[in-house]
Image (tube, rainbow, N blue to C red):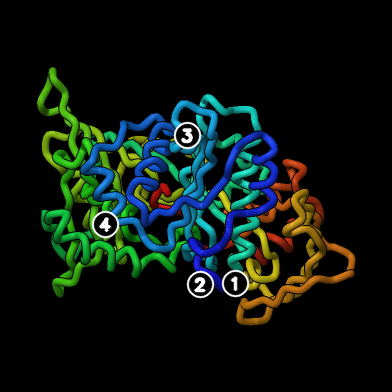
Amino acid sequence: MSTAPTGLPIDETSRARLATDGLRMAVVDATDPAAYEAWLRSESRGFHGDQPTAEVLQQRHAGLSADRRLVGVFDESSAQPDLPVATTICWPADLTVPGHRAVPAWAVSGVSVSQTHRRRGIARALMEAELRTALALDLPVAMLTVSESTLYGRYGYATAALARDVTVLTRRVRWTGPQPAGRVHFVSAEQLRDDGHAVVERVRLGRPGEISYDGHLWTRQLGLSVDDDNAKKLRLIRYDDASGTPQGFAVYHLVGDDTDFAEHELKLHTLVAATTDAYAGLWRFLLDMDLVTKVSAHLRPVDEPLRWMIDDFRAVRVTEVDHLWVRILDVPAALGARTYGSPGRLVIAVDDPLGHADGTWAVDVADDGGATVSATDDPADATMSVNALGSLYLGGVPARTLVATGALSGDAERLDRMFRSPVEPFLSIWF
């Protein structure tokens, strides 16, 4: 990345477009407490959140990383001209790609438009500005998690990693998985602040789709945000291996049944394990908990091994959702950052209405899985939309599936041999 995100001027194309409608688009000075407060109040309102208290504002402002780029759209004719009518917050983060590698990416978040200013092209101006900003920062990929899944395809994003919500009816199951060699400890959020994040960092490169994160995103997982209504309910556990080294952790809370105290539901927020032993140890602890009849887990990987570790497969119910969306901007840099499943040469033609990834590209994969990618005039082996390329990128969506949608044509078999990942992509957080 050649320039600090906060030092880059606002995107001129989108600024000028909004100015013709009497709107001002600007980078918000996050070092100014008053400017940050106005931005956060607007963003919170956009997501139907509570008005942030003084304590929340102080904590969030103090914990704001220097690389966070806040953008606001302002309407000087509104009743509150100092509050943005639209917001984004973006920052650079490493995105894990197949092959235990990472690519620098532009994390796009906090996208909101006030209900009073809908249908004026503000969202399009913001989203297209962030794509151009990413390119100006030499970031070849943009990424986001979405509150609505119908909005972002028009800007070239596509689902690249799915997630599942899992429910286990614990009275129906008996543990048949491995016998853990370590032990589980109850710990405080303060104890887990360092130990837990070290585990997160150790496992991050092993799973395509995971991103680098800390700061507010990390403290939020531990219930350390002052506005977390569930903080007092949270229980945190850490798994240490036989030598006493932390290898995993979980965060959960319990919900009682007013009619029967033995009918608690355990709601699992986070479970991260660096070893298969830690994975088994944490899950067995949770499933064996007294006075609990149901464990529900949000945001779990689609290749979760849990169902093969208990005796009743049908006691586990899953709901699958889209989660991480990816947008390819610089094809040679993005495709060259990952590894591939088989050597060879594949020429792909990409159609990008916004022009960023448009062109025909030769992907030359060496025997070690590394690739060089270059523009070419050779005939294409496969043709696809930029959205389809985003879905293929992390190796979780089969090319043959995209052929059925009409977003891709050509040699799907070779694409799958090269692009499919042996590890299913997954992102364990929202951002």
- State the SS at label 3: loop
Q: Position of residue 218 (x, y in %)?
A: 30, 55
Residue type beneath disc 1: Ala
- Alpha carbons under labels 3 and 4: distance apart: 54 Å
- Alpha carbons under labels 1 and 4: distance apart: 33 Å
366 or 54, which is in the foreground?
Answer: 54
At 42% from the left and 38% from the top, the residue drawn is 43
Q: Which mark is drawn over residue 337?
A: 1
- Alpha carbons under labels 2 and 4: distance apart: 26 Å
- The residue indicated by pointer 2 is 101
Q: Earlier in the sequence, mark 1 or mark 4?
A: 4
Q: Is residue 347 left or right of residue 200?
A: right
Q: How many marks?
A: 4
**Is the residue marked by circle 4 packed among few (<14), some (14-19), or many (20+) residues within 10 Å?**
many
- Whether pointer 3 and pointer 2 mark residues with C-beta atoms closer than 8 Å, the reply is no
Residue type beneath disc 3: Pro
- Whether pointer 1 and pointer 2 mark residues with C-beta atoms closer than 8 Å, the reply is yes
**Is the residue marked by circle 3 packed among few (<14), some (14-19), or many (20+) residues within 10 Å?**
few
Q: Earlier in the sequence, mark 1 or mark 2?
A: 2
- Whether pointer 1 and pointer 4 mark residues with C-beta atoms closer than 8 Å, the reply is no
Q: Earlier in the sequence, mark 3 or mark 1?
A: 3
- Whether pointer 2 and pointer 4 mark residues with C-beta atoms closer than 8 Å, the reply is no
* Residue occupying the far front of the picture: 77
Q: Which mark is drawn over residue 109?
A: none
* Residue occupying the far top of the picture: 259
- Alpha carbons under labels 1 and 2: distance apart: 7 Å
Q: Position of residue 51 (x, y in %)?
A: 31, 32
- The residue indicated by pointer 4 is 280
Q: Which mark is drawn over residue 81?
A: 3
